[in-house]
Image: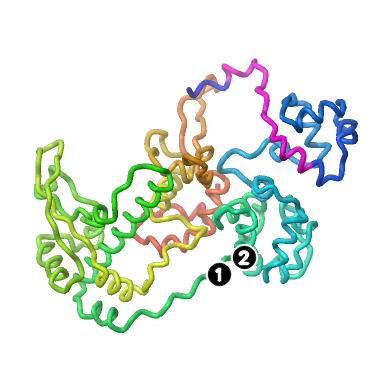
């Protein structure tokens, strides 16, 4: 339960659990024996042994002395909150020493080009300037991200996020963009044979299909029930009842944004079906307002997908780069960003998105930690007597992510509203 800050103001701080493997790794890296560390901290070597074995937890004051003796922040010894990992957190989680990381990176072209060494990795992790040719060039350091991800056995996005948290005052590494293959002439000819309205319909059907695919993938990652492709690829197009009563389907909303959703829906979709670009089916569903109603479903065919990708310059549907968000998650982040600086009401952000972008969240069964782009922060009542409410706000990394990639997201997902986000992109509070 979320409680008042003042309620616990007079209570002793809870003990912060120390990660024994991190303590051992840091002591070894510092070149200290247990006896030497014990002398610096003011405890017995036996107590250091107990800490490293996980038998005892240091008091807050001893934790601070341990961190000072090992020349690091306390978080290095306790582990970061999910969604707030830095580069050193990822290395410790992988169980690698500086020397081993150096060895792995020097096996890559980027590592050799940057003349990676243990001292340079240490400087990188501690936010200090890294001396050496090319280290100030984001397009060069960007080539080191993939080898780091491979060494730490994490996705590229985790390396990018940790890098930006560790080094907030400099430009983020720039990842190379994969070159798209040329579209086939036959697929492009099919696209060009369509009129403008048909092209809009086919393009939006493909985008909705792509979004559904992402959603199903997310559910599988979280070990949630998910439909088979034969089921979810049949996209709801229309409900056979007045929109004033049942509303619009998500696909209809896409078409309405292009101002092409009108009574001509049937002829347009059937024209695409006659060309073998989509398949149309019907079923019935229960609606709380009107009971059982008919529903029209549309599914893009392989030929239709090829034509749409060719016409829109996306022959293989590469999707967003590894460090960028999906359409669904960017929409959530944009909502929170638009509510800055007050923040978004606590009950307006819920569901599975928090497991991917909320601080402290993590998926089931060993899933990757959240990216930590948004966090629930307390808003105090007048006079500071208690917490009045909680609101969702961008974290420091969330603001940096929006600032770095807003132009790219506007091009990728042009239909998602981003008005008012320019202040964040300009670095304004």
Q: CA distance from mark 1 to mark 2?
A: 7 Å
Does residue 376 lie above or below 332 as drawn?
above
Q: Quadrant location of residue 101? A: bottom right
Q: Quadrant location of residue 136? A: bottom right
Q: Is residue 21 left or right of residue 162?
A: right
Q: Is residue 68 magenta?
A: no
Residue under the point 14% across and 44% down: 285
Q: Is residue 247 visible?
A: yes
The colour style of the image is rainbow
| Badge number at residue 142 | 2
Marks 1,2: beta carbons within 8 A: yes
SS at badge 1: loop
- The residue singled out by tag 1 in the image is 176
Does residue 187 lie above or below 148 as drawn?
below
Give residue 269's position: percent from left, percent from top.
15, 65
The mark nearer the N terminus, 1 or 2, is: 2
Q: Which residues are magenta?
A: 6-26
| Badge number at residue 284 | none
- Residue sitting nearer the eye, 117 or 241: 117
SS at badge 2: helix
Q: Is residue 41 left or right of residue 277?
A: right
Q: Is residue 260 left or right of residue 31?
A: left
Q: Is residue 284 left or right of residue 256?
A: left
Does residue 402 lie above or below 135 as drawn?
above
Q: Is residue 19 magenta?
A: yes
Give residue 49's position: percent from left, percent from top.
81, 30
Residue under the point 71% across and 50% down: 96
- Residue sitting nearer the eye, 364 or 373: 364
């Amino acid at each position: 339960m979320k409680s008042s800050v003042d309620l616990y103001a007079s209570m002793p701080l809870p003990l912060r659990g120390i990660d024994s493997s991190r303590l051992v790794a840091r002591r070894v890296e510092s070149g200290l024996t247990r006896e030497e560390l014990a002398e610096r901290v003011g405890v017995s070597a036996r107590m250091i042994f107990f800490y490293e074995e996980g038998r005892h937890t240091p008091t807050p004051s001893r934790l601070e002395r341990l961190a000072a003796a090992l020349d690091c922040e306390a978080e290095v010894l306790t582990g970061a909150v999910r969604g707030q990992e830095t580069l050193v957190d990822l290395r410790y989680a992988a169980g690698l020493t500086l020397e081993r990381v150096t060895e792995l990176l020097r096996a890559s072209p980027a590592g050799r080009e940057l003349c990676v060494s243990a001292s340079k990795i240490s400087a990188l992790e501690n936010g200090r300037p890294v001396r050496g040719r090319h280290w100030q060039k984001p397009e060069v350091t960007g080539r080191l991200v993939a080898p780091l991800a491979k060494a730490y056995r994490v996705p590229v996005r985790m390396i990018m996020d940790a890098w930006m948290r560790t080094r907030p005052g400099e430009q983020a590494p720039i990842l190379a963009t994969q070159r798209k293959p040329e579209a086939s002439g036959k697929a492009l000819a099919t696209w060009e044979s369509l009129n403008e309205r048909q092209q809009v319909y086919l393009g939006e059907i493909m985008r909705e299909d792509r979004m559904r695919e992402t959603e199903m993938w997310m559910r599988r990652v979280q070990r949630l029930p998910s439909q088979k492709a034969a089921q979810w690829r049949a996209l709801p197009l229309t409900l056979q009842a007045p929109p004033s009563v049942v509303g619009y389907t998500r696909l209809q909303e896409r078409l309405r944004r292009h101002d092409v959703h009108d009574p001509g829906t049937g002829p347009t979709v059937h024209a695409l079906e006659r060309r073998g670009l989509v398949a149309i089916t019907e079923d019935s569903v229960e609606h709380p307002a009107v009971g059982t109603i008919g529903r029209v479903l549309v599914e893009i065919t392989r030929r239709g997908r090829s034509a749409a990708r060719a016409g829109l310059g996306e022959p293989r549907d590469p999707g967003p780069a590894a460090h960028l968000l999906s359409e669904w998650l960017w929409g959530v982040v944009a909502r929170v960003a638009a509510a800055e600086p007050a923040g978004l009401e606590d009950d307006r952000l819920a569901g599975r998105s928090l497991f991917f972008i909320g601080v402290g969240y993590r998926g089931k069964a060993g899933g990757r930690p959240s990216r930590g782009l948004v966090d629930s922060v307390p808003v105090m009542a007048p006079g500071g007597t208690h917490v009045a409410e909680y609101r969702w706000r961008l974290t420091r990394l969330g603001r940096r992510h929006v600032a770095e990639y807003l132009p790219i997201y506007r091009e990728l997902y042009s239909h998602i509203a981003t008005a008012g986000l320019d202040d964040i992109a300009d670095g304004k509070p």
